[in-house]
Image (cartoon, grey):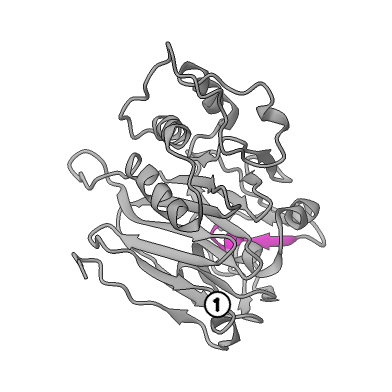
Amino acid sequence: MCTSVLQIANDGTHVFSRTMDWNSLQANPVFVPREYHWQTDYDNRLFQNKYGILGTGRKRQFEFDISDGINECGLSVQKLTFSHGAKLNQKLNSGNVGLAPFEFPFYLLGKYESIREIIADIGNIQLMSGENAVRPYENPHLHYAVTDRSGQLLILEPDQSPMKLIMNNYGVVTNAANFEKQAAKLADYLNMRDDLAVQKQVPQRISSESFAGKKVPSSSYTPTGRFLRAVYYRERTDIPRNEEENFVSSWHILNSVVVPKSKKYQANYTVYRAAFCLETRRYFFESYNNLLPIEIILSDELLLTKEAKIYEIKDKLVLE
């Protein structure tokens, strides 16, 4: 589970927000400096990141496992579960980079400035199965949402090699293995723009803004249910004027897809939600039990820091 939402304000600021739905909180806000050295779990290959990173994740033995983050160039990456859609590689092709699925966001954020650069290089990256790794790992089914200041939203799906690239003009990503089939269901709820497919970025409105005779999305927490609901409310919400309104609007859209803790009926719930402004590199994080988001900025001053930092958060009720 998980839901990602991209919104663009009238002043051009982009806010990329998400819910993280899991069975427990296992991540914290983290900062990783420029020139950070790390090794892959698959084959111990050594890398040195080019860019500083701010996001949500946890420290592993030789790298950071980043669930979502932004780098100093405004590139933002989020990983989401993929409904058993991943097909990981057993053999690494000569000259290619082999990564564990959980290392992929960290690799992208540390190396690339833009979606354009990622697309140009994606054929040289393989996500590897963990059975024969130097440090064996389980094989999580993940796919990835990537955006930058161009306003494009790219989905990377490892159901083939090289990975499938999907330009998503709807502004929302969830966990369904067949994105095209999921998106086709929007016709029951919105009168879609005729020119949506040729847009060069996610538009502020994807419909004609006429809802007459259309259905209202259900309250389902399935991947498609959350996708339809998030797109629908994104479409009906006032377009934010600026960055401040964009953060507030994005947080309220996420309210429609937050999964409450209900262990009797399902293992996963929204353990945290996060939002990133691509222009100012502001980051908001709120854990399930804390009703007061914390803010961290990937500032020029922070980027001069040489050491990685894990921000300890209190996952309990905090009101001030």
Task: Report the span colored magenta.
Answer: 97-105
Instruction: Give the camera-side residue of 6 and 287.
Output: 6
Mark 1 falls on what kind of element? loop
Above or below for 212 versus 302: above
Q: Residue at x 53, y 63 (%)?
A: 69
Q: In which quadrant will I find the C terminus?
A: bottom left
Viewport quadrant of the N terminus = top left
The reply to whether residue 279 is visible in this rendering is yes
Residue 262 percent across, percent down from the top left:
20, 44
Q: Residues within 10 Å of mark 1 (few under 14, many from 20)?
A: few
The image shows residue 226 at horizontal and vertical percentages of: 40, 35
Name above or below for residue 182 compared with residue 123: above
Percent coordinates x, y for residue 65 in the rendering: 50, 66
> On the image, which quarter does residue 167 sit in?
top right
Left or right: residue 239 compared with residue 202: left
Examine the image and state in which quarter residue 28 appears. Answer: bottom left
Q: Residue at x 51, y 82 (%)?
A: 308
Find the residue positioned furthest to the top.
Answer: 213
**115 with respect to 7 (left or right):** right
Q: Nearer the viewer, residue 126 or 223?
A: 223
Residue on which disc 1 sits: 299
Question: Can residue 131 be spotted in the picture?
Answer: no
Residue in the picture at 62% in, 36% down? 169
Query: Looking at the image, which is closer to me, 300 or 179?
Result: 300
- Compared with residue 216, is residue 250 higher up or lower down, i.e. above or below? below
